[in-house]
Image (spheres, rainbow, N blue to C red):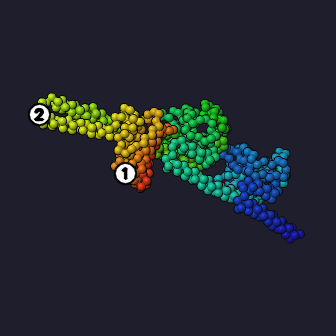
Amino acid sequence: MSTAIADAESRHALARLAEEQAALRRVAMLAAHGAPPSEVFAAVAGEAGALLGTDISMVAGRNGDGTVTVLGSWSTGTDGLPVGTRVTLGGHDATSIVARTGRPARVANHDTPGDPAEIAAPILVEGRVWGLLLVATRSDEPFAADIEERLATFADLVATAVANTEAHEQVRRYGEEQASLRRVATLVAEGAGPAALLKAITDELAATFAAMSAVMRFDDDLSEVVLVGKSGEIAVPTGSHWPIGETPAAAAVHRTRQPVRVEAAGPAPATGPHGAEIHRLGIVSTVASPIIVEGRLWGVMTVSDRAPLPPDTEQRLTRFANLFTTAIANSENRSELAASRRRIVAAADEARRTIERNLHDGTQQRLVSLALAVRSVQSSLPASLGDLRDDLSTVATGLAAAVEELRELARGIHPAALTQGGLSAALRSLARRSAIAVDLRLALNERPAEPIEAATYFVVSEALANAVKHSAATHIEVWVEHRDETLRLAISDDGAGGADARGWGLLGLRDRVEALGGSLSVDSPPGRGTRITADLPFTLGPLRPSA
């Protein structure tokens, strides 16, 4: 009898082991073949519940807000918890004990009728309690002595599946994040404008973090923040500003100059326009990173969500903030450089005007006076002094030629026609004096900014001079048009071509045009003439004084 019983128990143990191994193998195959996590969790709950002879089985994932969420559920009746149910932790049930201690827990309370007995095992992923596997029964039969060990085997299998899934997800997310950073970095390297860069970076943030994103700039005295960029879900317009005290994340960044996390148990109450928008969007979690440009706190970059953001959000957001910091620094350096170049051009033009006025009002007038005096003396001499009268006539003629040469010199330094009559008059004067026929076409309804007038004049003047000296052209076309806040000009000739765009004359013109925010290009294939085109802003903002 003893032998028969022993044989029966052995066969039962072997059958149970085989069933258990088969169940584990089925789950392992699902995980190995990359089944969706929801399918793996459901399989684990079903296999564990059926194998261990329980009434209820569930896989739950731990949240960061004192709750767990049911991810896989199985039951023999209708009393199981549906997937997606959130269970609050904090009691003396097995779920709360496992979440609190990270160790298996057994709760066998049969004192109250209908109160189930529970056993739960932690699901440990990289040393942290990721979640738990729980089985429960209302049977009066106690759980087997080794059930914790057997349940732990299933929990370990879930942990492996979760770790693999998280590893794949982490690799995928890292790849997407690097691609996103690379796209933004390309825009930074290309010198994209602030508007394009802000739109790109907020869109990339929203996609990378699956959350709402915003970029805010501090005002000069750090008392307010101004919304300068946002993702589409945020309704308030860019340019909106709030006191810094109404924006907890920005206030914390201002105080610490470090990445910060602001979380609430529920949507924040509506305090002011910013608080009202937070409440409308249901935001409960915000991570913010400072934007520090050359040692000063420029602004703050944020991502916000209706659920707690992942633990590594601060580190990941900082990478975007650092990239944006580089963009801002580059943009400000370019602005300073452009302003410096404009100041140099403005100073040079002012010096030209001063020299032209001095020549016209000083030296030129004195030469004219001397010529008139010589003519007066010449006319007063008697006929007997004919030789002296001829000498004085030669001197007067020379003085008149010197005045004309001086007038041409002054015109080359800074044409009086440009100051007095504007660009159209100055270009017509250039066309009339050209040794090659010029077809001048002007479409200007108003005068552009003074530096733009000067730059346009000197581009046309240099192009005409080069054509006369080098091109052997017979005809030149000059076209100047005001269109869409841009002054566009083109100078074409039918000469020999082959002009060197790197020559000092054209290089200087390009520097002048680019210093004013414009562009200049030269197309001069040998034997096919030369075409010089330029685009310049029609107006200019106020020139900031140098520091």
In this view, 266 is above or below 208: above
Q: Where's residue 543, x and y in %?
A: 41, 36
Q: Identity of the amino acid at label 2?
A: Leu
Q: Which mark is residue 472?
A: 1
Q: Is residue 194 visible?
A: yes
In this view, 207 is above or below 221: below
Please give the name of the residue rendered at 77% of the width and 57% of the height, measured from the top-left corner. Answer: 43
Q: Which of 133/229 is in front?
A: 229
Q: CA distance from mark 1 to mark 2?
A: 50 Å
Q: Quadrant of the C terminus?
A: top left
Please give the name of the residue rendered at 60% of the width and 34% of the height, measured from the top-left corner. Answer: 274
Tags 1 and 2 touching, CB below 8 Å: no
Q: Where's residue 131, x and y in %?
A: 70, 51
Q: Is residue 546 visible?
A: no
At label 2, counting other C-alpha atoms closer than 10 Å, the crowd grade (few under 14, some 14-19, many 20 or more) is: few
Numbered disc 2: secondary structure: helix
Left or right of residue 139: residue 226 = left
Q: Which of 421/322 is in front?
A: 421
Hey, which quadrant is residue 44 in on the image?
Answer: bottom right
Q: Where's residue 182, x and y in %?
A: 55, 52
Hey, which quadrant is residue 89 in on the image?
Answer: top right
Left or right of residue 186: residue 19 = right
Sequence-first tag of 1 and 2: 2
Q: Quadrant of the N terminus?
A: bottom right
Which residue is outermost to the left?
384
Numbered disc 1: secondary structure: loop
Q: Identity of the amino acid at label 1?
A: Ala
The residue that label 2 is drawn on is 385
